[in-house]
Every structure is written in structure tokens, then in C-alpha cells.
Image (cartoon, rainbow, N blue to C red):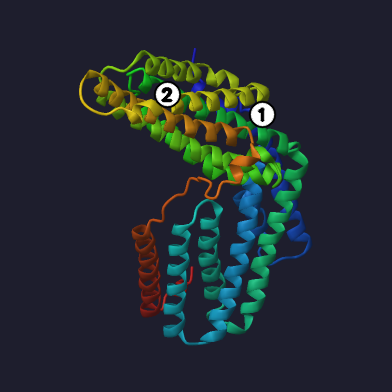
Amino acid sequence: MPDFSSVRWLVAPRLAALGFSVRTTVAALLALAIAFQMELGEPQWAPMTVWIVAQGTRGESISKARWRIVGTLAGIVSAVALIAAVPQQAWLFFPLLAGWIGLCTALGTLVHNFRSYAFVLTAYTCAIVSLSAVDASDQVFDLAMARGTYILLGVVCEMAVAAVFVPNVAGRARETVRARLQEIISQSAAAVRAILLHRSPPESDLHRILSLAFTLNDRIEFSAIEAGPGESVVRYARGTLGQVVRFTSRGLGMRSRLAAVGNVTTASKDILRAVVDLLERMPGDLGDPVRTVTLHGEVQALYARCSAAGQPTLRLAGTGSEADSAVDDRIMLQGLALLLMELVHMLGCYAADPAEMQSPVPFRLVRPADWRATIANGARSFIAVIVAVLIWEVTAWPEGAV
């Protein structure tokens, strides 16, 4: 019997995928019908915009639609400005256009999600409109308005149809964010627990934790759109992810601390065992808000116990086995105290504790700017446009604008 597993997505698609295709097709046909009714010159751009804007989730679709509108408006305004600034001056117009495209490409490299898309869209919308009007500068305004009409029509149709086909997005957004936070926290707790038991987790597990954290951090923007700006789960999610990374980092620090200590006292071993037991049952308590608050209180109590146990080790001095044991206790207990403090903040953010958001400098995950890639992408776009228009001008190619 033949195996159809590789084409299952085609012969037996998931309900969500089928619904996405149906609603996007309906929106595209609606946009095309309205474009025909309005007798637009190039009506195909309206349904094309629907397919470009449509995304798997409502938040992504709304975000991309917003930034597509911003990019389109910026592109048509810059196109009109370029044509008006240097009419019928090709060797001034083309370097300015290439510089603007290079700048937009560079700025798009610095930002993330659909903000980057908006900068790229600004660049090629400006190129499409201005190059279409390069031989008829008096028509640039009409071309710009036509381009903007196609885009706005497609965006409005997609958003209207999606609002009907995708109800209750707020509830599903809250559930999705909370489920993914639970997954990341559980994996982080398991990795740290393995370290405390002298069983270092594989590097791939640590990489997966960081990858999941940064991926969810990027997608929270879309969940916030779906759930609304006042939803506490989404507002505290960024802080929770930041604390997860800090907690995991503290756990990795415990690996070197545990390797450095020799014999520790029974009291210190009991505290270490209590932390291990707490991390073992923590994933099961995250699904219940009441149990999460109780767990938060237990971690605070354990942190106070750990800090109190470490105080006597600071007053012991001299040499001998007692002093050596005190130093070992101090190394381990200070590391556990730092680890538990990060866990207190992480559970506080996860439980939407208002006190956590009043911190002077709340921790957030931030992607560093890649200036080398920014300069390289901007320069590459500038050079590519300059070379293309040079060939166009030298060869007098009739279809060079395309």
C-alpha cells in the first residue's frame, strides 16, 4: 500500500490550515471584486496584497498589515519627493534613489519582525513608483495614489474577513503564551536541577532553552495585539523570559561552584536537596495559579533559609578543616542564594506580581544590533541599484525600469 504521509498536508490538511486558505481566498476575491468595481488600472495588486499580508495568526496579520501600510505610505511619499526634487535629471535621480534604497535596507537590518519588512517595503515601493514615473514626472502623483489604493484595499479586506473567520483570538493568545512560558520554565528548571545533581545537561538542551526564549520574545508582540494591551499575561511575559535566561545562567554558574567545593556540612547539603526537590515539582505547579503563588512563597522562604545559613560562614576565619568547610559552604550557599533570588523574580513575573514591574531596571531580552551586517546590506543594495541603472542608461534598454 502506498505511503501518503509526505503529501498528507495536501490530501488531509489540518482544520486550521484549511480555514486559513479559505478565509484568505475569500478576502482576495473580495479585494479583486472591489478593485474591478472601482475600475482600478491594475486590480491584481489588491488580491496580491491580501496574500502577502495574510499570516497564520491574527496578531501577525494585523502587525504585518500595519507595517505594510506604513511602508507603502513612506515609499510613495519618498517617490514623489525624489521625482519632484530632480525632474528629468537621471544622473542625479538614480544615485539618490540608490542611496535611499541602501539606507532603508540598512535600517531594516537593525530592527526585527515586520518593522524590518516596513523599511524594505519603503525601498521597493519608492523604486516602483518613481521608476514608473521617470519618463512622465507629471504623473507621479497619480501613480502613487493608485499604488496606495491597491495596498490599502487589500489590507482592509484581509483584516475584515479575518475578524469574522478568527473569533476569540484573545483567549487563545493568553493560553498560547502561558503554555509556552510553562514549557520554557520547565526545561530551564530541569537543566538547572541536573547541574545541582552533578549531571550536566547536554549543550543542545541549553541552546534549545535560549532559542525558545528568544523566539517567544519575538512573538510576544503578536500575542499582545491579539490579547489587548491590558492583558497581564502578555505584559509580564517579557520579564519572565528575561528572568528565565538569568536563572539558567545562574544555574550554569553553579556548575563551577560545585566543582570547586570539597566537603560541605550537612546543613548545606539539606538546603541543596531542598532546592533540587523544589525544582523537580515546580513544572507541575505552574499550571495552577494558586499553586504558583504558593510555590513563589516557598522559594522566598528557601532563599531566606539559604541566606541565614550563609551568614555564620562569613565570620569564620583561620585555618584547619573547620575553616575549609566554612569556605566551601560559603561558595555553595552564596551560589544557591543567587539562584533562588532569580527564581523568586521569575515566578513573580510569571504570576503577574505588580511588584516585579516596579523594579528600577526590569530585565528584558534584547537582540544586539549587528552593525557589520547593517553596513554590508546597505552598501550591497546601493551598489546593486547603481550597477543596474548604469546598464539601463548605457544600453538604453526599453524595459530597463522593470
Q: Residue at x 44, y 22 (%)?
A: 190
Residue 282 vs residue 99, the one in the foreground: 282
Q: Residues within 10 Å of mark 2 (few under 14, many from 20)?
A: some
Q: Secondary structure at mark 2?
A: helix
Relative to 257, residue 111 above or below: below
How many numbered discs sit on the rendered protein?
Answer: 2
**Element type where label 1 sits in the image:** helix
Q: Please report whichever mark, 2 or 1, sits nearer to the chain's N-terminal start.
A: 1
Question: Which residue occupies 42% across, 24% down?
Answer: 309
Quarter location, residue 65: bottom right
In the rendered image of this protein, does residue 367 appear above or below residue 97? above
Q: Residues within 10 Å of mark 1 (few under 14, many from 20)?
A: few
Q: Amino acid at mark 1?
A: Leu
Label 2 vs label 1: CA separation? 57 Å
Res 199 seen here: yes
Question: Residue 202: which quarter of the image?
Answer: top left
The x, y position of residue 168, in whole percent, is 75, 36
Q: Which residue is at the far left?
A: 319
| Residue 349: x %, y % from top left | 58, 36
Query: In x, y percent, where is residue 124?
Result: 51, 65
Q: Residue at x 56, y 46 (%)?
A: 359
Task: Name the disc covering residue 252, or none.
Answer: none
Q: Which residue is mark 1?
A: 15
**335, 57: nearer the viewer:** 335
Q: Which mark is residue 309?
A: 2
